[in-house]
Amino acid sequence: QVQLVESGGGLVQAGNSLRLSCAASEAPTFSGDALAWFRQAPGKEREFVSCVEWNMRTYYADSVKGRFTISKDNAKNTVYLQMTNLLTDDSAVYYCASRVRGSYSSDPKTYESWGQGTQVTVSE
C-alpha cells in the first residue's frame, strides 16, 4: 500500500505563495503513477486541483490555472504543488493522491492511495 505524506500547508495572506510537498513510500511504481492534488473546504465536496501523468504532462482546474504548478520528482518519490497569488477561496485541506494507472483523471474515485491532508488557509 502506497503511503503518502503531505507537508507545506499553513496560514498565508492573499497574494502570497506556498509550496506543498507529498512524499510517497512503499511506491515501487511511482515513476509510472499519476499523482494529483485535490482540496476540500468545509461544507464542500472534494474537488480536483491538478494532476501530473506518468509522462509529466500536467492538468489543472480552471480555478487554479496560471497560478498553481504541479511537478513530480521520480528520484525523490515526491510531487509538489507550487501555489502563487493565493486567494481566500483557495483555503482548504489539500490532499495528495496517486493511482497506478498513470493517465490523467480528475475523479477522486479513480485514485487508490491518499495522504492525510494539509491545511492551507489564506487570509485577507
Image (cartoon, helix red, strand yellow):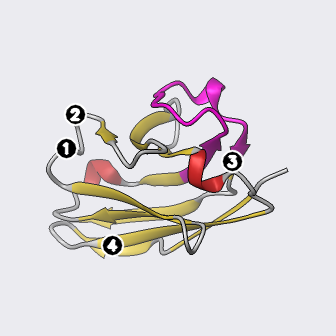
Task: In this rendered view, identify the residue nearer to me: 39 or 112.
Answer: 112
Mark 2: amino acid: Asp
Label 2 with label 4: CB-CB less than 8 Å:
no
Q: CA distance from mark 3 to mark 2?
A: 23 Å
For disc 4, the marked residue is: 18
The mark nearer the N terminus, 3 or 4, is: 4
Q: Amino acid at mark 3?
A: Trp
Q: Place residue 108 in its image quadrant.
A: top right
Q: Which residue is mark 2?
A: 62
Q: Residues within 10 Å of mark 3 (few under 14, many from 20)?
A: many
> In the rendered image, which residue does mark 3 sit on?
114
Q: Where are the magenta residues, as a range?
A: 95-113
Q: Give the SS element for disc 3.
A: strand
Q: Which of pointers 3 and 1 lies earlier in the amino acid sequence?
A: 1
Name the image quarter holding residue 63. Answer: top left
Residue 57 counted in the magenta span:
no
Labelled disc at residue 65: 1
Residue 34, x across and y down, in percent: 54, 42
Disc 1 marks a residue whose amino acid type is Lys
* x and y percentages locating residue 30 in the rendered image: 64, 54
Tag in front: 1 or 4: 1
Return the disc, 1 or 4, that comes first in the chain's sequence: 4
